[in-house]
Amino acid sequence: MKLKALIPLIVFVALAILLGWSLRHDPRLIPSPLINKPAPEFALPVLHQPDTQMTLADMRGKVWLLNVWASWCVSCRDEHPVLLEFSKRQLIPIIGLDYKDKRDDALAWLNQFGDPYTNSIMDTAGRVGIDFGVYGVPETFLIDKQGRIRYKFTGPLNADSLEHVLLPHIKELQGA
């Protein structure tokens, strides 16, 4: 009978330990099964020229970033000034993947806040985002010259994460 009285206490302690363990991990470090694998193929319309399509093959031979964003994304507004400053350094092409957005809204957003992207492509249905394993926006993927995903950053980039996390990976892939 005493064992039955202890079961709720044991369950509570187990749940507290599990919760404590999960809170110690950074949610931005969500592992991606696509790391070191080829990036998914895509052919999407270019935001500024919707009659033109961009494909993964267009970026072969370059180390580049794919930044998933949307005009409706609040966190993207926090990240955007960081991308604008980084793009001025012209270290690497930044391709914007406008995710589940309306073209007019995306164009207005870039007009209002600035455009850090070498090119933006429209994923209005979200299928390419799903292929990349996007959990939410913003997310940023580092893709090597062979078209393999080498790093994934979940959440908004800030100056510190860009300089100390992403930039070392970029330099390594560029052979610098």
Image (cartoon, rainbow, N blue to C red):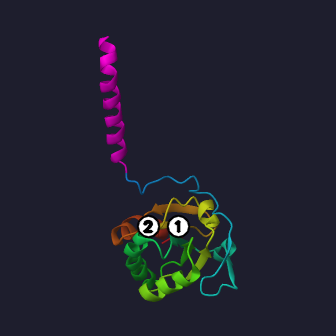
Q: Which mark is residue 107?
A: none
Residue in the image at 43% along x and 64% along y? 155
Q: CA distance from mark 2 to mark 1?
A: 8 Å
Q: Is residue 47 part of the magenta span, yes or no?
A: no
Q: Which mark is residue 166?
A: 2
Relative to 38, is 63 above or below? Answer: below
Relative to 86, is 30 above or below? Answer: above
Asked whether disc 2 touches disc 1, contact meaning CB atoms under 8 Å apart, the reply is yes
Locate the N terminus by quadrant: top left
For the question of whether residue 140 can be seen, the reply is: yes
The answer to which of 113 and 1 lies nearer the viewer is: 1
What's the magenta region?
Answer: 1-25
Q: Main secondary structure of the magenta part?
A: helix
Q: Is residue 16 part of the magenta span, yes or no?
A: yes
Among numbered discs 2 and 1, the one appearing first in the sequence: 1
Could you tell me residue 46's position as x and y percent? 63, 82
Q: Is residue 57 left or right of residue 140?
A: right
Type of amino acid at the residue the image marks with label 2: Leu
Could you tell me residue 37's position as x and y percent? 62, 57
Q: Which residue is mark 1?
A: 142
Could you tell me residue 30's position as x and y percent? 47, 53
Residue in the image at 48% along x and 69% along y? 170
**Secondary structure found at label 1:** strand
Residue in the image at 45% along x and 82% along y? 87
